[in-house]
Image (cartoon, coloured by chain):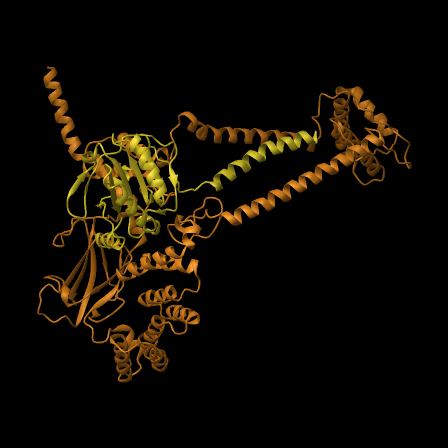
Chain colours: A yellow, B orange
Amino acid sequence: MPWRRIVLTLAVIVPLIGILAYGFSRDPRYILSPLIGRPAPPFTVTLFDGKKLSLSDLRGKVVFLNFWASWCPPCRAEARDIEATWKKYKDKNIVFLGIDIQDTEEAALAFLKEFEITYLNGRDASGRISIDYGVWGIPETFFIDPEGWITYKHVGDLGSQIITSKLDEARRGFISAKEGKGSYQPIR
Amino acid sequence: MARFSLLLLALLIFPMALQAQPDDLEEQARRIAAELRCPVCQNLSVADSPSEMAQQMRALIREQLKEGKSPQEITAYFTSKYGEWILLSPTSEGFNLLVWILPFIALTGGILLVVLVVRRWVQRKSGYRQGEVDPALIQRVQQDIAADKVWEVDPDIEGPRAHLIHEQARRYTELQELEFDYQKGRISDADYRDLRPRYEAQAANVLRELDSSSALAMTETQSRGAKRQTKYAGPAQTGKASSRRGWVFAAIGAFLLVFGVTLGVFLSKSLRPRSSEQDSITGDFLTGTGPGGISASSAMGGADLQSLLTQGHAAFERKDWSQAIDAFKKVIAIDSDHPEAHTYMGFILTQAGHADSALLAFNRALSTNPEFPLALWGKGMVLYRDKGDFPGARQNLEKLVDLLPPGAQRNEVQRTMDEMGSRPADPVQSKQLVAGSSRIEGTISVDPKLKAKLDSRDALYIIVRSAGSAGGPPLAVKKVGRPVFPLSYSLGPENMMIPGRPFSGKVDVSVRLDKDGNAMTRDPGSLKGDYKKNPVEIGSQRVDIIIDQVL
């Protein structure tokens, strides 16, 4: 009789502790993206040099799409790695495109100057592109294959190793099952 | 005829559609936004969140409504971008159905459990139902009582009928006590006549229950005076049962101890105070996210400390105080004695008019590095400008002069000391007016009640008029596009509408957040605020304005 009671009590308490543990062990801010394995939302962005660029213009190329802001420390942490990887890949039918969000133009330009960034960069002043890509923490990076499909998404700072391997996967049209995570800054 | 009907229908619908435009659109947008969760303030809806992201989302909802999209289409759009996470109420399909059903199942189960427990409790309390009592059982009870025996049950007795045996002993004892009290004249005839049959019935009911179950032996022993032991089980069995009971208690105790310790460790490691609006209360230990979502390992790195400082400097320079405070606080969280971060906090506090707190910050910086030039400068200036403590200010500035190499900076400090020597100590004067300045400075904030009405596209106008002049062009106007509140401002001769006029004397200062960005029109719905102590003298500082009116 008492054993039955203990088993019954445990049967109630253990799942409750399990739920509690699950709740505490997950990042409450994390939002899983439904966009991986889907066509990348189209957009047109005005680059910092004044030219306009549409995603559709980049069809046939692998696109490394990175959302960033000058006030975000993890964006600063990854900036040099991205630039170095871009220099390595710029002649290999791959396009690096940075989208600056929730920022002022002056601060963004100062950021680009500070890290000597040479790949394409534009500003999403209205926030339309970032909403289209479901951005919630920066830096946030999308890898788009030559067909225009999103193959991988990474929230948080990236190292050159991940960039290289995911660019290679995107070139082959290989869609990752899971998104990646690094140190990130919630958007404002 | 059909064509006529269609025309009539079109005519009927057209004015209705026209009427339904602006207010309806706002209301519809609000309703859609209220169903969506804000990705920044995750416990608020997009309608309620003051974040920039939520503002952009609200603008997008309005835009899509204007394009003729239905609320369902708009919700589906956001769901396609952020997943079902974005919905404050998850859909009642598939696995999500559990979320909708489980609370009701739990509630029904809980109510049933309470009803069952209460029923059992009431039954035990009030004895067993009266009436329908077998007279033979009553007779048995009366015989047992007449036998005048002492009823006692082994407290360790166990088994499915244990509670009935206890109950029987209790009822019998009650009856014996009633009899004893009556014979001693302690209760009245009426009470005795009322209580006796009731007690007998209750005892008879217990007997019936005992009989109906496989009757468990209750051995009677001895008569009054000699204790009679009623044993359900033999002594060996009782000993075994009681040792088992001991183990059960020990196991429960150990479990509770482990549970408590685990929970304590768990909570203290995974919860922390929020260090900023962006921060969450969980993180570090389990989720790998540090303050504001930055992992502790990355935040601890020297490179990040440097980038936080750079970020703080940049925010400080563009007078974005909240950003600057955030950055310097993070630096202090990593290195609690960082002199530079404390010094900048001191400068920010000075700007906000908290001279005493600023002095504390400068002192904190100087306690780590007594020769930190920036802190010496900050402390000296606060003592000079805000406190009127010239000797104290001089002491700090002299130390600074000794530290600085000859050059522009040193000359500037020297000049300030000379200026100090020629001025009387008047803290009030120095606090209110910028020496020799023809500027107006202060901060602008928004009444929390009006925060929901802010639109990221609004333009802010700071308007200075000559005191008492209601009409005509203002003396000076400054426009701030896409303002972020609280905002610090400074107006000077460069903002004058009619150059050449003197920018001096008493003026009225007000601000307006304009919907269409045109200063000449006063759009309904625009927000406004006046300086509460108008008129003010040009050269005043801390002309702080709160936007608290709707036009």
**Farthest top residue?**
B1
Q: Quadrant of residue B405?
A: bottom left
Percent coordinates x, y for residue A150 in the rendering: 30, 33
Percent coordinates x, y for residue B150 in the rendering: 86, 34
Using the image as rendered, state which of residue B539 and residue B447 is in the foreground. Answer: B539
Pick the quarter of the image with the N terminus of chain B.
top left
Q: Quadrant of residue B437?
A: bottom left
Percent coordinates x, y for residue A115 in the rendering: 27, 53
The answer to whether residue B514 is above or below residue B94 is below
Percent coordinates x, y for residue B425 in the rendering: 31, 82
Q: Quadrant of residue B312?
A: bottom left
Name the side, left or right, on which B182 lies relative to A143: right
Q: How many marks?
A: 0
Residue A108 in sight from this viewpoint: yes
Using the image as rendered, state which of residue B515 and residue B325 is in the foreground. Answer: B325
Residue B153 in sight from this viewpoint: no
At horizontal 28% and vertical 52% (from top left) the residue drawn is A70
At horizontal 36% and vertical 40% (from top left) the residue drawn is A162
Name the side, left or right, on which B242 lies relative to A42: right
Name the side, left or right, on which B466 lies relative to A174: left
Name the side, left or right, on which B112 lies relative to A171: right
Using the image as rendered, state which of residue B493 and residue A180 is in the foreground. Answer: A180
